[in-house]
Amino acid sequence: MDFTLAAQNLISPPVLFFALGVFAALARSELAIPEAVAKALSLYLMLAIGFKGGVAAGEHGLGLDLLTVIGAAVALSFVIPLIAFALLRTTTRLSQVDQAAIAAHYGSISIVTFIAATAALNAASITYPGIMVAAAAAMEVPAIITALWLARRGRQNGSQQQPTPWREVVLNGSVVLLIGAFAVGMATGERGYEDVAPFIVDPFKGVLCLFLLDMGLVAGRELRHVARTLSPALLVFGLYMPMVGGVLGALAALLIGLDRGGIAILSVLTASASYIAVPAAMRLALPEAKPSLYLTLSLAVTFPFNLTIGIPFYIALAGWLS
Amino acid sequence: MDAYKTYPKKRLSIIIEAPYLSRLLESLDSLEVPGYTVLPALGGKGQAGSWRRDSLSSDAGRMVQVILILDAEKVAAILKLVRKVLDRQMGIVTLSDVEVLRPDSF
């Protein structure tokens, strides 16, 4: 592993602000970021990353490349929950519905992990294809469908089922904004980019720091419950499952011929676990699954792991493979 | 109308998870209820643990309250629907007697 890269990532401002948030929450500081501000920050980050991806994709043109990448991303999002579910079946005694709900989080993605990875790649001067933003948007939903299928397979026939919340799942805010900003970026190209660059490029890193401070606070509060909520087997799952997904994503990216940056991003996407879109979908579709399990695992275990150790590992892995 | 006269009505309060709000409201609209008010909750504690609004990453876990003021005879049909909609969701449903100043609004 490239230790310079790992060290550089660990002492980068976004990661240190995240650590500050975790510390503040663990120390029970009064520091808090209002919910509406945190939401606005996340909308800004998604708009900026979507737009930049669209401009980059517009420059290089669309075509088979886009379809191959999206196809691979969707397939991974469908398949990873099956692997996560099988691992949970063998290592934990949770109910099938809880296992399916947790599996959904690992097939879907965390857009902030993705954004942090792009920041780390930029810092290391490694470029990545703009279409990876579209891949990220495409990976939000398929995992939810697999998880619902897994959960329903385990229920007895005749027991009442919640209808699948298609509208909320497919048109969830982050998917609409990412794809929408991507389309705007593609349509307006370099000229549009120059117009909005002062808003979406220059403040980007600062906003990411503020957002990660909030994520640190949220993760830190969840961390306080880890010992009470998660069994050791589940806790360990939150650490090795991202590696399993990350390696799988990297191999798939290699197979479809992505470059080093592309391999690293697809690896990060498959390694990350959702904590916004999927939890809301699970509350609608699988209300009996315990949110304390999947939220704590995704927010307090997998997200910090990916942000600190995971991202440099996936970038190094991409370097070895490419 | 006597300015101080009040009229008996029923107040139905439904505290539910935020992701479920739009479905509940669509169901209430289908029954043509006279109106409702939605209030945000700041935090709370229940069987699934405690939460605070500024410490959540998504709508999952956030709760909202829907308040309806109704004629007593409309209550049964609405409760039946609420029961169906909220079958397995978290939440608290309460019914209480209230007095209103302007009965025609409900």
Image (cartoon, rainbow, N blue to C red):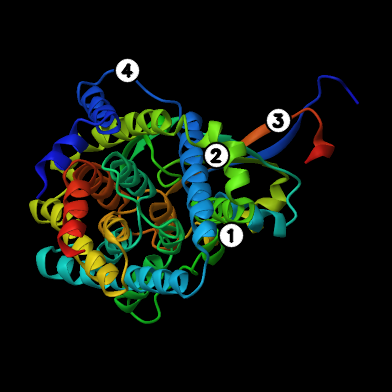
Looking at the rendered structure, the secondary structure element under dot 2 is strand
Specify the amino acid type for callout 1: Lys
**Residue at mark 4 to residue at mark 3: CA–CA distance:** 41 Å
Report in which chain the residue with disc 2 lies: B
Left or right: B57 as drawn, with respect to B95: left
Report in which chain the residue with disc 4 lies: A
Residue B79 appears in the picture as rendered: no
Report in which chain the residue with disc 1 lies: B
Q: Position of residue A306 (x, y in %)?
A: 22, 47
Specify the amino acid type for callout 2: Gln
Give the crowd class for mark 1: few <14, some 14-19, many >=20 residues within 10 Å: few
Query: Circle 4 sits on which residue?
Result: A30
The structure residue drawn at horizontal position 50% and vertical position 69%, both measured from the top left corner, is A163
Query: Circle 2 sits on which residue?
Result: B65
Q: Nearer the viewer, mark 4 or mark 2?
A: 4
**Residue at mark 3 to residue at mark 1: CA–CA distance:** 23 Å
Looking at the rendered structure, the secondary structure element under dot 3 is strand
**Residue at mark 2 to residue at mark 1: CA–CA distance:** 18 Å
Say whether disc 3 or disc 1 marks the residue closer to the N-terminus: 1
Q: Nearer the viewer, residue A254 or B16?
A: A254
| Image quadrant containing the C terminus of chain A | bottom left
Query: Circle 1 sits on which residue?
Result: B80
The structure residue drawn at horizontal position 40% and vertical position 63%, both measured from the top left corner, is A139
Q: Position of residue A185 (x, y in %)?
A: 57, 51
The structure residue drawn at horizontal position 52% and vertical position 54%, both measured from the top left corner, is A54
Q: Nearer the viewer, residue A174 or B33?
A: A174
